[in-house]
Amino acid sequence: DAGVTQSPTHLIKTRGQHVTLRCSPISGHKSVSWYQQVLGQGPQFIFQYYEKEERGRGNFPDRFSARQFPNYSSELNVNALLLGDSALYLCASSLDRSNTEAFFGQGTRLTVV
Amino acid sequence: GDSVTQMEGPVTLSEEAFLTINCTYTATGYPSLFWYVQYPGEGLQLLLKATKADDKGSNKGFEATYRKETTSFHLEKGSVQVSDSAVYFCALSDRNTGGFKTIFGAGTRLFVKA
């Protein structure tokens, strides 16, 4: 079985641009969560989506948004990119919304120049 | 708000030494607790978990006990190997208005020397 897949693996964007990151959960998993991991720190929670609805939001500005599709895949969108948005963006999927068994993808490395 | 604090690294040990990585948490509810591991060049992997007080999670020789009275979830291993060199993250999952949020500590890098 395929694990959690994220695309692209690496991305370079210019300040002020917009970016879309994609995540495909493990088959049968209905919950997708997004995290930002800055170098040398732990992942920071951005969003949780379950059954196509937003179920949780971390302390991130409105420039960050996400959605979940009927097939449970998800997109994370970031508008008006800042240098500080440079990070590894991780997606995790789980069967239910409790996240007691979350599986992480390899992440998308975003560099903003 | 919820938070996780774990000991700063790096931790450097010789092979077969005893490992302890301390982790304490604050939470408004009754969270589940986790240890994740990130090996060099790889993604985060769940190492072990405990979902209620006094539960002990264990995997690959690692173990941690959910201590509600001390709000702690310290990771231990009796005899580390070179292959255990990685970054270890303590985390909690707690309710968050209709869903759950997972809060991670800053991570502790472990180096094991042969």
Image: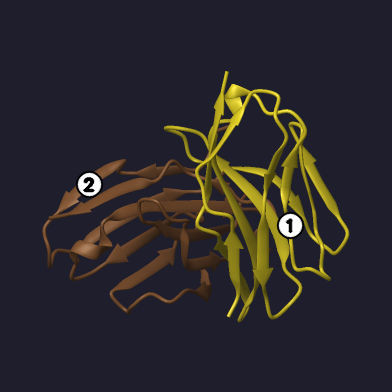
Chain colours: A brown, B yellow
Q: Which mark is residue B73?
A: 1
Query: What residue do we see at 22% from left, 69% from top?
Result: A79
Badge 1: chain ID: B
Badge 2: chain ID: A
Q: Position of residue A40 (x, y in %)?
A: 39, 51
Q: Quadrant of the N terminus of chain A?
A: top right
Query: What residue do we see at 26% from left, 42% from top?
Result: A10
Mark 1, Cα crowd under 10 Å, few <14 / some 14-19 / many 20+, is: many
**Above-or-below relation of A35 to A59:** above
Please name whichever residue, A44 or A89, is drawn nearer the observer in this view of the structure. A44
Mark 2, Cα crowd under 10 Å, few <14 / some 14-19 / many 20+, is: some
Q: Which mark is residue A11?
A: 2
Residue A96 in view in this figure? no
Q: Amino acid at mark 2?
A: Leu
Please name whichever residue, B104 or B94, is drawn nearer the observer in this view of the structure. B104
Q: Which mark is residue B112?
A: none
Which dot, 1 or 2, sits closer to the camera? Answer: 1
Q: Position of residue A84 (x, y in %)?
A: 24, 64
Q: Quadrant of the C terminus of chain A?
A: bottom left
Q: Position of residue A4 (x, y in %)?
A: 50, 43
Query: What residue do we see at 52% from left, 66% from top?
Result: A49
Please name whichever residue, B13 or B69, is drawn nearer the observer in this view of the structure. B13
**Above-or-below relation of A57 to B86:** below
Residue A86 in view in this figure? yes
Q: Amino acid at mark 1?
A: Phe
Q: Position of residue B5 (x, y in %)?
A: 59, 63
Q: Secondary structure at mark 1?
A: loop
**On the rendered structure, is B8 left or right of A19?**
right
Labels 1 and 2 share a subunit: no
Q: Secondary structure at mark 2?
A: strand
Compute the Cα span from label 1 to label 2.
Answer: 36 Å
**On the rendered structure, is B100 left or right of A39?**
right
